[in-house]
């Protein structure tokens, strides 16, 4: 099942990426070590790397599994981050990153809630979940504010090359219908 290309919230448009978004994504978050610290990829050193990310993000929409959205602030069209929805049988997982200048404004919690709401309107989705590094307190707070519950720790679950070359522990958060 494919989500819609646009999900609207009170303050945001979650929309399919475009190639012309690459400079704003690069400047907004992809180049910052503090933003990419807990991601599975290193900060981008050139806008060309971000263009490749946009191309992969757009191309993935032709499949049935991964759907990345950019979070566009309705008020000024600024990009507030990105969220990826990953479809699985009877459940959906997600991951996200926020634009450095937009941290602390509640945009990511709003996007996570909207994603959960969309998922639970689908008759075949019964569980939504995500993981976060055990040291990523802001991400944990986003999921808690979105109504998700911590189900435990996944040992040696994720690789975060910006922190360590060894697998790291993650919390798993979920919400069910």
Image (tube, helix red, strand yellow):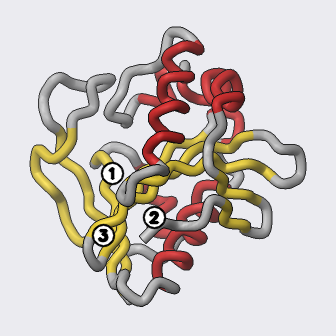
Q: In this view, does 12 lie to the left or right of 43?
A: right
Secondary structure under tag 1 reads strand
Callouts 3 and 1 close, C-beta under 8 Å: no
Q: In front here: 73 or 171?
A: 73
Badge 3: few (under 14), some or many (20 or more) residues near its Cα, within 10 Å?
Answer: some
Q: Which residue is drawn at 68% across and 22% down?
A: 23
Identify the mark at residue 143; answer none if there is no mark: 2
Vertical side of 128 occupied by 138: above or below:
above
- How far apart are the alpha carbons under marks 2 and 3? 9 Å
Callouts 1 and 2 close, C-beta under 8 Å: yes
Q: Mark 3 points at which residue?
A: 150
Dot 1 or dot 2: first in sequence order is: 1
Q: In this view, does 168 lie to the left or right of 59?
A: left
Secondary structure under tag 3 reads strand
Image quadrant where residue 161 sits: top left
- Residue 159 locus on image (x, y percent): 21, 35
Secondary structure under tag 2 reads helix
């Amino acid at each position: 099942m494919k989500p819609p290309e646009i999900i609207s919230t009170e303050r945001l448009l979650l929309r399919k990426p475009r190639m012309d978004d690459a400079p704003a994504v690069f400047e907004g978050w992809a180049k910052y070590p503090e933003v990419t610290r807990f991601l599975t990829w290193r900060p981008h050193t050139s806008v060309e790397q971000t263009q490749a990310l946009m191309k992969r993000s757009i191309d993935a929409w032709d499949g049935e599994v991964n759907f990345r959205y950019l979070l566009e602030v309705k008020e000024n069209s600024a990009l507030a981050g990105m969220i990826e929805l990953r479809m699985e049988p009877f459940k959906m997982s997600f991951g996200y990153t926020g634009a450095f200048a937009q941290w602390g404004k509640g945009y990511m919690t709003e996007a996570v809630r909207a994603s959960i709401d969309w998922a639970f309107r689908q008759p075949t989705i019964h569980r939504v979940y995500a993981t976060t590094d055990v040291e990523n307190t802001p991400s944990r707070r986003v999921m808690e504010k979105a109504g998700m519950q911590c189900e435990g720790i996944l040992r040696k679950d994720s690789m975060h090359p910006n922190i360590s070359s060894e697998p790291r522990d993650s919390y798993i958060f979920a919400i069910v219908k």
